[in-house]
Image: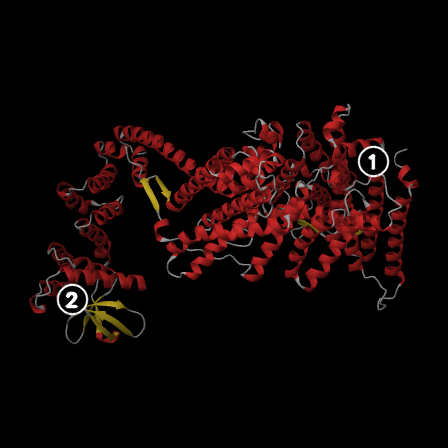
């Protein structure tokens, strides 16, 4: 209700700005038009509405919308026509339709609603849409034309055709032509079928389906042909959508697993608390948003370094307090870090809350990128996909081009030799573990935009992450990237016919069988690194 | 005979003596002590102790593969749950027409889902002997297939741990699905009687408790028999130096497969005894958390001792009962802390502490520090 109200207010305010303020109220032609509408007998209402439309007054849309919503009333005493902003309760809030000025509240007994009948109400939608088609903003025009699909009736055909001629925006013209063609196909026009043939709009398909069943042989045949070509296009689009969702799921897996690829793959440390480090990153995002209320975008960007730092610090603490004492005992490390994961989960439950927290998606990340009528890509997933690739590239750079990366590889391949060359192996261990943990934190920041942030967040990803690392080949970052993306895509491909849960089971079984065939994963390490 | 050899060992005699003494004592205190006496053991406690004994048998099964074969299975909960489901299916069929919907053949949840007839894999479970065979066969077969594939391609160590975890996770997801025909989310419950005895009477509960104790004793003797046999020695050799054992001419994967399957069957029996005492089986038994918890029982008690596993299972579960009663929030802290403390400070568990006290008496097959962690 309040949105409706504020929209109306806004509209009126805009209208006022546009209309000439100098116009004296008494001379305002709008006043006469409104009174004409209010006083018109049932048979003349249509005429009165048309008069308002053809007046070209920019406030006409607001008036007619209010009229359609029963929000146009007359003050009994003065005979003035007013807009009702809020019709709840005894006193109604009213405004002057000519200036948009708020006139305060008035008892509803003193107001007389301007009557409307159902015929007019039915036409009003089309009339309003036509008004929008004249709006200066091409986006409004396009949206309005989009709304008209399948709603065109005989009365609208002529004005639409006129509009088609004078419209200069190609996108809008396209939509109008489509809306008209849908109507014409419904009327049995064969040529209009060709206009619809290329369209992916569901209304166009519905119209063609209808036509394909009609008695008119020629029409039915050409409609069937058009439908076939649409089906083809749709199939392509659906495949593209599946691929997109698959890559998106894959990017999440890559993000979750890439930190593990460093701690498990490179250092050989099984960190079962990795999922909880992801969770810490996600909670950092939530915490940052609490620190900067009302600025979710800024908070999110600041969470990227903050999440990294928080998780990396947690990682260093874990490494120093537990893992360093369990060097060379992978199974014990697994158990101890699992214990840590339990403690971290319970810590979050006790300190923050067992319930999920809401992380706000900033405006520039919500919504979707519309490719065509059948395909639109959600922006947040697109961002996460890009983020995953950036993180991957960054890690690749660190491992390949920096001194840290060089030292890490040296320590991995031959610890004793590296130490005798003067590398401080313990320091390298800490740095590597901090890096892997920090990346888990980054994954958490990204995940907070896609899933619920709760104490169980990490648990949901730990098994998948290990699967990705093992599938890709331990110690191989490229392997992790390819394994993550392909597992995500396979999962999405299976989903339509197997269902989400079964798809996941199939993927798990597939990996289990795959490991039997190639125990070292997709891209096994070769040479000296493999011996370590 | 490999099975009678352990009976001549002092450690086994001691273990069996303590176990039977405990069984007799609990039975006596339950039956002959007056209700209001402080020494009276209530039927509730008897069932609780029976539950601990099931866990103890499960822990012995895990210790067999982890302690003596070096395979850290994070999926033993799956075998336990499969045995439990086999028993649960038998108990479901025993309900007959006493269910809520009164259908003579179909369990309630199937009627609820509008199924017209029994799925094929539910046939035969109305007969006790068939169900009891399935208790052994279902986990055994899964272990056989999984183990055959894994050991043949020499998947060991951490990799094996992770894929066993994936196995139980996949099974959990599968059993959560209603279409699987195992009751989905709710699992199997509302059992009435077993072998004609009403499950709600104290006598049946006591009987189940004693049966569990005997099963634990048999399971212990079997495991002890295996580890003291020649096969057991080879299996310890596989644990400590797999490649060397292979080069000596032993078929490592066959030894591993045999021990793994035996262990899975023992876990299945534990699950089957667990279900009638707890009265429900649902997919949460497949959860990776449960499987990994079993490992920490064994780690606390002491690996490669068998009796340590029993001590660990009973201690941890007693602590769990106490903690979740007094302050439920603290339990996960305690459990998590236990994982860390045991692995860092008590690598040989409680059994290790006991052995340190009596250094003179050491089993020659008890591993020492580093070797045991292969």
Q: Tell us which disc is closer to us: 1 or 2.
A: 1
Report, in whole angstroms, how far the alpha carbon at label 1 lies from the one at label 2.
96 Å
Tell which of B348 and A92 is nearer to you.
Answer: B348
Give whichever of A419, A157 is nearer the camera.
A419
Task: Indicate the quadrant containing the C terminus of chain A: top left, top right, bottom left or bottom right.
Answer: top right
Chain containing mark 1: B
The numbered dot on residue B120 is none
In the depicted structure, whether residue A198 falls above or below residue A42: above
In the rendered image, residue A206, in percent from the top left (x then y), is placed at 32, 39
Say whether residue B40 is visible.
Answer: yes
Q: Position of residue A197 (x, y in %)?
A: 28, 32
Residue beneath label 1, please? B226
Q: Residue at x 63, y 48 (%)?
A: A337
Callout 2 secondary element: loop
Q: Are there few (<14), some (14-19), or many (20+) residues within 10 Å of tag 1?
A: many
B362 on left or right of A206: right
Relative side of A497 to A58, left or right: right
Residue B366, picture quadrant: top right
Q: How is the image coloured?
A: secondary structure
Q: Residues within 10 Å of mark 2 (few under 14, many from 20)?
A: some
User: Which quadrant of the rendered structure holds the N terminus of chain A?
Assistant: bottom left
Taking the spot 75% from the left edge, 34% from the top edge, the residue there is: B240
Residue A508: x percent and y percent? 58, 37
Q: Which residue is mark 2?
A: A99
Relative vertical location of residue A48 with respect to residue B282 in this rendering, above or below: below
Mark 2 belongs to chain: A
Q: Are marks 1 and 2 on the same chain?
A: no
């Amino acid at each position: 209700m309040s949105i409706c109200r504020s929209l109306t207010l806004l509209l009126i305010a805009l209208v006022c700005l546009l209309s000439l303020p100098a116009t004296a109220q008494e001379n305002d032609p709008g006043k006469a038009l409104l009174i004409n509408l209010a006083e018109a007998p049932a048979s003349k209402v249509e005429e009165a509405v048309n008069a308002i439309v053809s007046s070209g007054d920019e406030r006409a849309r607001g008036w007619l919308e209010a009229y359609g919503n029963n929000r146009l009333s007359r003050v009994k005493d003065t005979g003035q026509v007013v807009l009702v902003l809020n019709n709840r309760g005894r006193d109604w809030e009213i405004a002057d339709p000519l200036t948009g000025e708020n006139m305060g509240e008035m008892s509803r007994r003193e107001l007389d609603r301007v009557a409307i009948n159902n015929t007019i109400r039915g036409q009003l939608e089309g009339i309003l849409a036509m008004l929008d088609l004249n709006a200066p903003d091409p986006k409004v025009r396009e949206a309005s034309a989009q709304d008209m699909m399948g709603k065109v009736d005989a009365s609208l055909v002529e004005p639409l055709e006129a509009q088609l001629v004078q419209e200069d925006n190609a996108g809008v013209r396209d939509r109008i032509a489509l809306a008209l063609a849908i109507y014409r196909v419904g009327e049995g026009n064969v040529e209009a079928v060709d206009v619809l043939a290329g369209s992916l709009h569901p209304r166009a398909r519905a119209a063609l389906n209808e036509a394909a069943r009609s008695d008119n042989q020629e029409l039915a045949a050409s409609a069937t042909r058009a439908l076939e070509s649409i089906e083809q296009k749709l199939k392509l689009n659906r495949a593209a959508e599946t691929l997109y969702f698959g890559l998106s799921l894959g990017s999440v897996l890559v993000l979750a697993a890439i930190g593990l690829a460093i701690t498990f793959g490179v250092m050989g440390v099984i960190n079962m608390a990795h999922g909880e480090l992801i969770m810490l990153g996600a909670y950092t995002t939530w915490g940052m948003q609490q620190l900067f209320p009302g600025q979710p975008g800024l908070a999110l960007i600041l969470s990227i370094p903050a999440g990294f730092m928080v998780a990396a610090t947690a990682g260093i603490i874990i490494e120093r307090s537990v893992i360093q004492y369990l060097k060379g005992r992978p199974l014990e490390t697994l158990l101890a870090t699992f214990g840590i994961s339990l403690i971290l989960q319970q810590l979050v439950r006790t300190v923050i809350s067992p319930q999920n927290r809401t992380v706000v998606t900033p405006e520039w990340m919500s919504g979707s990128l519309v490719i065509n009528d059948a395909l639109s890509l959600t922006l947040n997933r697109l961002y996460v996909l890009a983020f995953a690739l950036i993180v991957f590239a960054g890690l690749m750079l660190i491992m390949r081009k920096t001194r840290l990366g060089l030292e890490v590889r040296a320590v991995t391949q031959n610890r004793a030799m590296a130490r005798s060359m003067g590398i401080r192996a313990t320091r390298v261990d800490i740095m590597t573990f901090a890096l892997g943990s920090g990346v888990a934190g980054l994954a958490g920041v990204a995940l907070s935009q896609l899933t619920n942030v709760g104490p169980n967040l990490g648990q949901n990803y730990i098994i998948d992450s290990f699967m990705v690392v093992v599938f890709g080949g331990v110690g191989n970052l490229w392997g992790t990237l390819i394994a993550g993306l392909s597992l995500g895509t396979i999962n999405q491909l299976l989903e339509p016919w197997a269902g989400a849960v079964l798809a996941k089971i199939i993927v798990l079984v597939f990996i289990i069988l795959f490991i039997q065939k190639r125990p070292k994963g997709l891209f096994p390490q070769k040479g000296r690194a493999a011996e370590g | 005979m490999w099975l009678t050899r352990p009976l001549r060992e002092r450690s086994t005699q001691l273990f069996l003596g303590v176990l039977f003494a405990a069984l007799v004592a609990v039975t006596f205190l339950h039956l002959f002590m007056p209700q209001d006496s402080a020494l009276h053991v209530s039927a509730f406690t008897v069932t609780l102790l029976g539950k601990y004994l099931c866990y103890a048998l499960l822990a012995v099964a895990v210790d067999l593969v982890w302690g003596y074969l070096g395979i850290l299975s994070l999926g033993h909960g799956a075998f336990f749950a499969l045995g439990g489901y086999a028993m649960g299916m038998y108990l479901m069929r025993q309900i007959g027409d006493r269910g809520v919907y009164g259908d003579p053949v179909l369990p309630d949840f199937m009627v609820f889902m509008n199924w017209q007839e029994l799925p094929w894999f539910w046939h035969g479970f109305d007969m006790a002997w068939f169900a009891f065979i399935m208790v052994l066969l279902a986990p055994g077969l899964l272990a056989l297939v999984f183990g055959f594939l894994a050991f043949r391609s020499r998947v060991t160590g951490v990799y094996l741990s992770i894929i066993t975890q994936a196995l139980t996770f996949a099974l959990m997801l599968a059993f959560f699905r209603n279409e699987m025909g195992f009751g989905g989310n709710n699992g199997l419950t509302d059992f009435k009687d077993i072998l004609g005895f009403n499950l709600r009477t104290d006598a049946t509960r006591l009987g189940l408790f004693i049966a569990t104790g005997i099963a634990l004793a048999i399971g212990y003797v079997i495991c002890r028999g295996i580890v003291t046999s020649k096969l057991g020695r080879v299996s310890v050799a596989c644990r400590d130096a797999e490649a060397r054992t292979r080069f000596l001419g032993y078929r490592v994967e066959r030894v591993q497969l045999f021990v793994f399957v035996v262990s899975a069957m023992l876990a299945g029996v534990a699950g089957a005894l667990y279900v009638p005492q707890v009265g429900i089986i649902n997919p949460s038994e497949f959860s990776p958390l449960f499987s990994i918890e079993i490992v920490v029982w064994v780690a606390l008690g002491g690996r490669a001792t068998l009796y340590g596993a029993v001590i660990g299972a009973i201690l941890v579960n007693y602590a769990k009962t106490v903690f979740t009663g007094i302050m439920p929030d603290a339990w996960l802290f305690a459990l998590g802390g236990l994982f860390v403390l045991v692995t860092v400070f008590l690598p040989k568990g409680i059994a290790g502490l006991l052995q340190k006290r009596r250094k003179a008496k050491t089993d020659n097959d008890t591993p020492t520090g580093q070797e045991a962690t292969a």
